[in-house]
Image (cartoon, grey):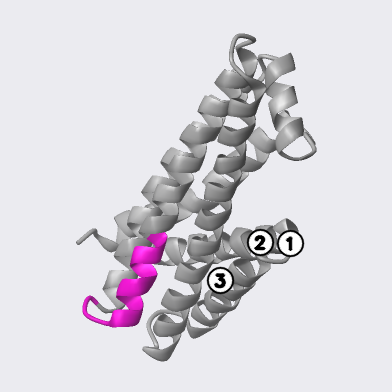
Amino acid sequence: MLSSKSTGWMLIMGIIAFVVMFISQTMQGDTDGTAGAVAWAASSNDWQIVMPIRMVTIMLMLIFTVGFVSLARSISESNSVISIGAHFALAALILMWVGFISQLAGFDTASDSTEPASAAHALVKFSNMSFWFGGAAYGVSFLLVGIKAYLNKVGTPAFNGLLALLGLIASAGSFVSWFLWMIGFGLGLVVLAIIGLQKIMRE
């Protein structure tokens, strides 16, 4: 098991990843859906700058997820709710990686005039779906781990309860609006970063 301090630093990586992802999305601009993203990649080589930055995000999320699973297991290693929450986080990470690789392949295909545009469109569309499922899965993991931590009275109850609430907003909001998911997931990462700082300062 990771030390409390290591877990704390890893939890902080989540909000850093969120900021880096926001920067990469800002650089890409408003591409108006799948067709717009494909057209953007076909007309500009900017994707070759954006995607390495996005890869940094996914790597940071890997570090964050290791810390999050460690946090979950520190609450209880045998509880079924914790185990499900941890596995949802791992599934979310895998989906994020699949989404990134598919998006990279889609943009590369779009920039190649010899490749059919339909192939690029399908890859980017698949990427969007993978990212969507991954985001919803992270929300479920926050909800389950937050609830169990609150019920077990581990750490700061207010943060645990807030994490569960934000996880609910992120998971349910992903079915309603991208903006709601952003709020729930982003603030959930902020809460986990604060929990991480608490672990660092206590050790």
Circle 1 or circle 3, nearest the eye: 1
Q: Mark 1 points at which residue?
A: 177
- The residue positioned 50% from the left and 37% from the top of the image is 100
Q: In which quarter of the image is the C terminus?
A: bottom left
**Viewer-side residue, 21 vs 111:** 111
Where are the magenta residues, as a range? 77-89
**Viewer-side residue, 52 vs 64:** 52
Q: Residue 129 magenta-drawn?
A: no
Disc 1 and disc 2 in contact, CB within 8 angstroms: yes
Q: Compared with residue 98, is residue 195 higher up or lower down, i.e. above or below?
A: below
Q: Mark 2 points at which residue?
A: 181
Sequence-wise, which precedes: disc 1 or disc 3? 3
Whole-percent x and y of residue 8? 38, 59
User: Can residue 49 be seen at all in this image of the molecule?
Assistant: no
Q: Which mark is residue 167?
A: 3
Density class for disc 1 (Cα within 10 Å; few <14, some 14-19, many ≥20) is few
Q: What residue type is labelled 1?
A: Ser
Q: Quadrant of the N terminus?
A: bottom left
Sequence-wise, which precedes: disc 2 or disc 3? 3
**Viewer-side residue, 97 vs 59:** 97
- The residue positioned 55% from the left and 62% from the top of the image is 136
User: Can residue 199 be seen at all in this image of the molecule?
Assistant: yes
